[in-house]
Image (tube, rainbow, N blue to C red):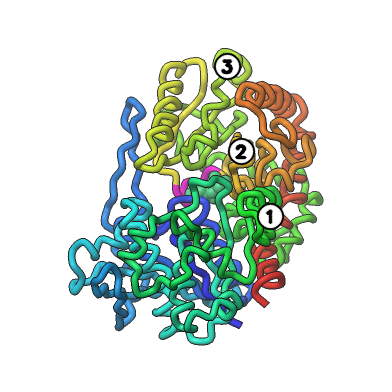
Amino acid sequence: MKIAYFCMEIGISENIPSYSGGLGILAGDHLKSSADLAVPIVGITLLYKRGYFIQHITPSGDQLEAYPYFDPRGFMEPLPFKIFLQLDGRKIAVGVWKYVYQGMKSKVPIYFLDTDLPENLSQDRLITQYLYGGDQYNRIMQEAVLGIGGYTILKKLEPNITTYHMNEGHAAFLTLALLKDFNGNEHKVRNLCIFTTHTPVPAGHDRFSYDMAWQVLKEYLPQNIKRLAGEDALNMTILALNLSRASNGVSELHGEVSRQMFPGHEIGHITNGVHHLTWTGPEFQRLFDEHIPNWRSQPQTLREATKIPDEAIQKAKKAAKKRLISYVNSLTGAGFTDEMMTICFARRAAAYKRATLIFTDIEYLMNLSYDRVQYIFAGKAHPQDQAGKDLIKQIVEISKRYEDRLRLVFIPNYNIWLAQLMTQGTDVWLNTPRRPREACGTSGMKVCFNGGINMSVLDGWWREACKDRVNGWAIGDDEDQPDEEAAMDLYRDLDDMVTTYYAAPKKWTSIMKRSIADITPFFNTHRMVLEYLHKYYL
Ligand SMILES: *Cc1c(COP(=O)(O)O)cnc(C)c1O
């Protein structure tokens, strides 16, 4: 058995800008757990020399994007060969960089494909330059390099692949390369492929006009492509669904939503997780080493966390919080303190995540929070997403306008490093998506490994994990709520939470412990990879 794991972004290290958000982090964590468990797998993605952007925020709250040059040579090795693809009537050279991730039990290679080679036209050297930066034409070229180029390269480097795992539809052109190799035998292709979808929103599924697809992929498009990929446009998700032996969504609810979106397809679900060794901070690592010695190889043993003494949990949390607060103060001068309850909200600034919901009734919020709660926000908006940028601007404006009445800061440049600092340091992780738009969500899981507590709408993973007021707080109930109503429920929970934190510290600590003990044993990528292994890989 050997799995080839294809993904447009793989976030394996804070040093490599090859991811933009949840999808890439999940891909990285999937490969890391596979390496810890000795599941034979290789990763394949693109090398972005000007990866996802660095975010600067101007004093008035505007997002500026910078794309500094990333030199891969410090982290990976260029392999001494290249392949050639026939795309849009041109011959395009594709090179490969090899990165090796060393896990607890095995090594996992990740191959980064690169068209920035001297023999390519300057426009083609740019194909792999930016992550999610270009137009439709750049996107189809990127996806052709990933799917078809990736397949071609693996034939050389990793023979005997038994399953091609397409993580999101971006990689679905891989099926066309396979079809070509097997003379159009769909049955054979289907036997080799599995597919994971991540997006419960129709607009999130890539579609290309058949005009463009013919122009770029002539060599690869079978006669019956419209039957395989949709009548009106080439839909990458439909193509992947039609040519996979199994498909899945990434939480129970997302599985249901996906079955409604794509009737006639069998779609299961495997709930996402996070790599516990990446996301547990040094304070809680030491604590677990002392009290739950097998947690590194068997994260499910963290269910014993209830036996850790209260004072030890509180001490570890305080130390992790100190690190976060020091960074915030050094950056902003805001004078935050590790004595005060801290709430973080950090995620891509996409409208459906409703970052500003908590500001619905600002007077109420300020009265409730005065000298009791401090708020740290972060998140990048996609460069072309004006609505997302407006959200950031609003938050920055609120933080300035009410600076003497509300402890609120926006910290720039959310990335793996900052996500670690925030999920490790915070008391509370706030999440207010519009149901059911958060396919799964993973940042809240990271918080549980560090004794933090979630307060979230019952969407994605939290719907499966939450025991209200026992291991966290549920905002609203198991249905979609309009903003006004969700905001009222949020304030009610916040009130309860603040009271518990200050008036019932023992209760608070017991919720911290249940957050670890109830949630982390399941919501980790070791469990997730083993589920993929037993359901789909074997
Ligand atoms: C974990 C993580 C995400 C995903 O978080 P969501 O819960 O899906 O919002 C996004 N970006 C970074 C940098 C992360 O570490």
Q: Which residue is the site of mark 1?
A: 523
Q: Is residue 388 left or right of residue 367?
A: left
Q: For residue 125, what is the image quadrant? A: bottom left
For the C terminus, which image quadrant? bottom right
Magenta range: 415-422
- Compared to residue 160, the image places residue 260 above or below, namely above
Q: Amino acid at mark 3?
A: Asp
| Coordinates of residue 218 in the picture (x, y in percent) | 34, 71
Where disc 3 sits, the SS reads loop
The rendered magenta stretch, by its main secondary structure, is classed as helix
Q: Nearer the viewer, residue 276 or 460?
A: 460
Q: Which residue is the site of mark 2?
A: 429
Q: Within the magenta stretch, is there residue 418?
A: yes
Q: Amino acid at mark 1?
A: Phe
Q: Is residue 450 left or right of residue 59?
A: right
Packing grade of label 2 (10 A; few <14, some 14-19, many >=20) is many
Q: CA distance from mark 2 to mark 3?
A: 20 Å
- Compared to residue 280, the image places residue 451 above or below, namely above
| Coordinates of residue 470 in the picture (x, y in percent) | 79, 39
| Coordinates of residue 99 in the picture (x, y in percent) | 42, 72
Q: Which residue is the site of mark 3?
A: 361
